[in-house]
Image (spheres, rainbow, N blue to C red):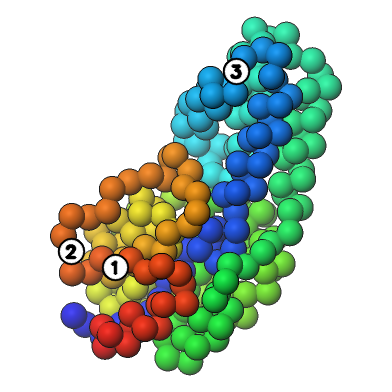
Amino acid sequence: MNDITTLGFDADDTLWHNERMFRLTEERFTALLADFTDKDQLKERLLAAERRNVLHYGYGVKGFTLSMIETAIEVTDRRVHADVIAEILEAGRDMLSHPVEPLPYVEETLEELKSDYKLVLITKGDLFDQERKITVSGLHAYFDGIEIVSEKTASTYATLFARHGTGAAEAMMIGNSLKSDVLPALEAGAIGVHVPYEITWSLEEADAPKSSDRFHRVDHIGKVPHLLARLS
């Protein structure tokens, strides 16, 4: 294994809480439409809309809000009241101004690692919202590079680790999503470290690689320095 020079970090649900805000808003949405369909069916319809729309709207709050509106129109046979649409839009605005709460061990881990490695923040989603969260979190000062991308692929990681470091072969990508943070990073030749979060969005679910000496899982981000010490 080559020396590790560069560490990539995912943002949402790796550095700060994010998915639980979506789930709370989903509960708010189902309550608004309780007279038209049951909760489980509505959630399935919403997820189907998100799956259709992610290619058009991308990831993040704005796409989620548009998917809620689309689902409301569908399940009510276009009879949804304007007041409901207004509440959905308000819920979306609330998400876009939601406080950013860093996860445990994040700041002390970044502080410990920044002097020995190049740290790169690699996140996907709406540009304005991701920029807001990065600024509000106060964590941007720890990173040598920040990249907000539309999708995370092997090509994305190969390009970014070459741009900010010494290439994917000497990089480690750390994140909560196997689908977006780990598997494409492994494909690019990097080490992939899975840091599970309490909730996983259905569209981010994937199976862990069956065997790979470049795949690791840690209970929380505070264990990353120990993993690096073991691999060195």
Q: Position of residue 63 (x, y in %)?
A: 60, 37
For marks 2 and 3, give the one nearer the viewer. 3
Q: The residue under label 2 is which amino acid type?
A: Ser
Let me know if residue 65 appears in the view: no
Determine the image quadrant of residue 89.
top right
Packing grade of label 2 (10 A; few <14, some 14-19, many >=20) is few
Q: Whole-Å distance between the Cαs marked 1 and 2? A: 9 Å
- From the viewer's perspective, tell me whether residue 103 is left or right of residue 117: right
Q: Residue at x 42, y 45 (%)?
A: 204
The quadrant in which the C terminus is found is bottom left
Packing grade of label 3 (10 A; few <14, some 14-19, many >=20) is few
Q: Which residue is mark 1?
A: 216
Q: Which mark is residue 38?
A: 3
Q: The residue under label 1 is which amino acid type?
A: His
Let me know if residue 125 appears in the view: yes
* Marks 3 & 1, CB-CB < 8 Å contact: no
Local SS, label 1? strand
Q: Residue at x 59, y 45 (%)?
A: 60
Local SS, label 2? loop
How many numbered callouts?
3
Determine the image quadrant of residue 164.
bottom left
Q: Which residue is mark 2?
A: 212
Q: Residue at x 69, y 19 (%)?
A: 34
* Marks 2 & 3, CB-CB < 8 Å contact: no
Q: Residue at x 51, y 81 (%)?
A: 109
Q: Whole-Å distance between the Cαs marked 3 and 1? A: 40 Å
Residue 70 versus residue 163 in the image, above or below: above
Q: Position of residue 181 (x, y in %)?
A: 39, 58
Q: Quick one: label 2 or label 3, which is nearer the N terminus?
A: 3
Q: The residue under label 3 is which amino acid type?
A: Asp
